[in-house]
Image (cartoon, rainbow, N blue to C red):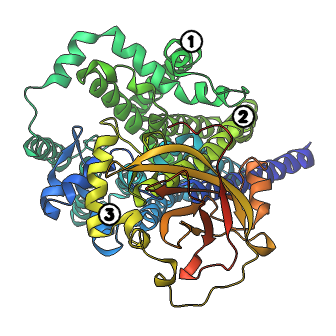
Amino acid sequence: MYKFAVAAERAAQICAALAASIFLASGVVYLSLGHWTVTHADFWRIYDFALNHTWLDSALLKHNGHSLFYPSFFWLADLRFFHGNQLPLFLAGLSLLFLTVALLLIPVWRDETVGLTTKAIATLTVIVGNFWMARSPIIASGGFNSICSLVMASAALAFLLLPRRGVSSARTLSVTALVVCAGFVASFSFGTGRLPWRSFLPLGTATVVAIVIYQRLPPHLAGYRTIHTAGSAGLALVTRLCRLAGGPFFHAVSGWHEKALSAELARSSMLSLWCGAAGIVLAVFAMTLTIIRRDLARSSLKLVGTALVTFNIVVMALVILGNRVRKPRFEFEFLSPRYLFWSTLFWTGLLLIGIQLAESRQRLRWLVYLIALALPVLVFPMHYRSGLNCRWARILAEAGATSLVNGVRDDQQLHILAPLAGTGQVYHVAEELRARRLDMFAGGLQDWLGLNEASITSSPYKREGLRGQCTIAALAECDNGTPAARITGEIWKGGRRIPQTLVILDPTGVVRGIGHSSSVYSENRFLNRVFYSKKVTGTRFFGYIRDYDPRLQYAVRSADDGILSEETIPVRVPATNPKP
């Protein structure tokens, strides 16, 4: 029996290590190949203000009621020093995500009250909870990830420091100061951060100061609508909180369906309601038991779990209240997948508490182990689907950015980049980005438009073995009102290499448009086969023709590194007239 127990422990450790490694590796690959590479969503509005105001004004402004003071310096620095390139912003967000995981795992591995198997299982839980791609609406965006992961990293630092208060007053004062600083960074990174405990007078004072500062930041809010809403809504808010908390279950089950479950079904899902209600009840029970026993100092694993549960249940409550006081169209916004960032961490904390409590109970222990080991398998279908969706979203986003580079107003392609305010704001801010040569305009490809092909490069034409086909897919309109055409196709060089930049030429050799490949890994078909099941083609490209004349024959050349290919690919006109 002893040998069997040892073998079972070793098997559980190996399975946890393998599952954690696979999940982490796949998550990093999906994020690397599927993160947003151009300005998107709320950042059109944020950049519009930032480009016309000082750094301090931009940092102090509240966006949708959220103070983004600290994370705003990431994108302000990106605009100033990296020409609005989204890669540094993505790397900053990814680094903060890794930092959060590290800060959560340090107490786990320092806990001397649990064994190696429990630590391995807890590590698996933390990795799955943080790198599950269902959270991609946040973690695949450099800007949004910088915001939310900075909140969590700061909170995790506070979790790590609180139990390290020393006996001496000097040590207590220094640790308290660090906790207050971490709490302030969290509070003014998304406007919803709060310190997990108010055990000391300085912490309570700091909380009051944070609230006062928040209220003084522009724009000023009239009254205290959130408090009034909480008092009048009652049961409706509790129901929504349960649905929000149960969101990970709904999305995990959705991943097992051939087609993703609809948002309408999410509003009436009993699965998310009852699972969320069960989670809230368990969380309240665990927190109440902890308050009665006052035993958090005994296990740092339990401390991390309790802190995650407490912190994220407060965040979810604030999300529900915030949606309630906004316009009616935001009534069900709490069901948006982006809030999985918080609800997933809530369940991560709850499972960590269960893992710690089951450590001394043999039968319950293995039941919890099996649940934790089954977790990556149960959520992997949604993990894969979300990774695939991110890749397609990146392709569509870059196609939309290509339309802006060409000065074409293609609302259909630009829809994925647009905020709720619509494409009008995108076109307005894009003109500012163009004038300042930021983001998709930083490379200067827009300067080629209207030039003869011989004048855009001093290098000789190069034989590339260019092959493929392209056709006119739809008609659009240029920013000056002249006709334009969207072209799509598949083009590759010799050896299945993928050209990243292409130019569309008229019969006289004048550049009438710019094209861009959807591939980020060139001819590497291994990634497509292993991570995307061959569902993403690496040879597809998008482009536009300005001042389109259907009587002319256009052609495409590759233009990587400013070197034009000798070969050209003719642009075919379909038998049926393309529609706008």
Residue that carries the numbered disc 2 in the rendered image? 378
Relative to 309, is 432 above or below? below
Amino acid type at mark 1: Met
Q: Residue at position x 71%, y 35% from top?
A: 365
Q: Position of residue 42 (x, y in %)?
A: 33, 45
Q: In this view, does 273 lie above or below 253?
A: above
| Mark 3 → mark 1, Cα distance in angstroms | 40 Å
Disc 2 on helix, strand or loop?
Answer: helix
The answer to whether residue 538 is visible is: no
Determine contact: label 3, label 1, CB under 8 Å.
no
Judged by depth in the image, the label closer to the viewer, 2 or 3, is 3
Q: Label 3: which residue?
A: 74
Marks 2/1: CA–CA distance: 19 Å
**Residue 370, x across and y down, in percent:** 75, 36
Residue at label 1?
Answer: 270
Q: Which quarter shows the N terminus?
A: top right
Mark 3: amino acid = Phe
Foreground: 414 or 115? 414
- 212 sits left or right of 51 in the view: left
* SS at badge 3: helix
Sequence-first disc among 3 and 1: 3
Sequence-earlier tag: 2 or 3 = 3
Q: Left or right of 143: which side holds 558?
A: right
Q: How crowded is mark 1: few (under 14 residues within 10 Å), some or many (20 or more)?
A: some
Mark 3 or 1: in front is 3
Answer few, some or many: residues within 10 Å of disc 2's Cα (few below 14, many 20 plus, some between 14 and 19).
Answer: some
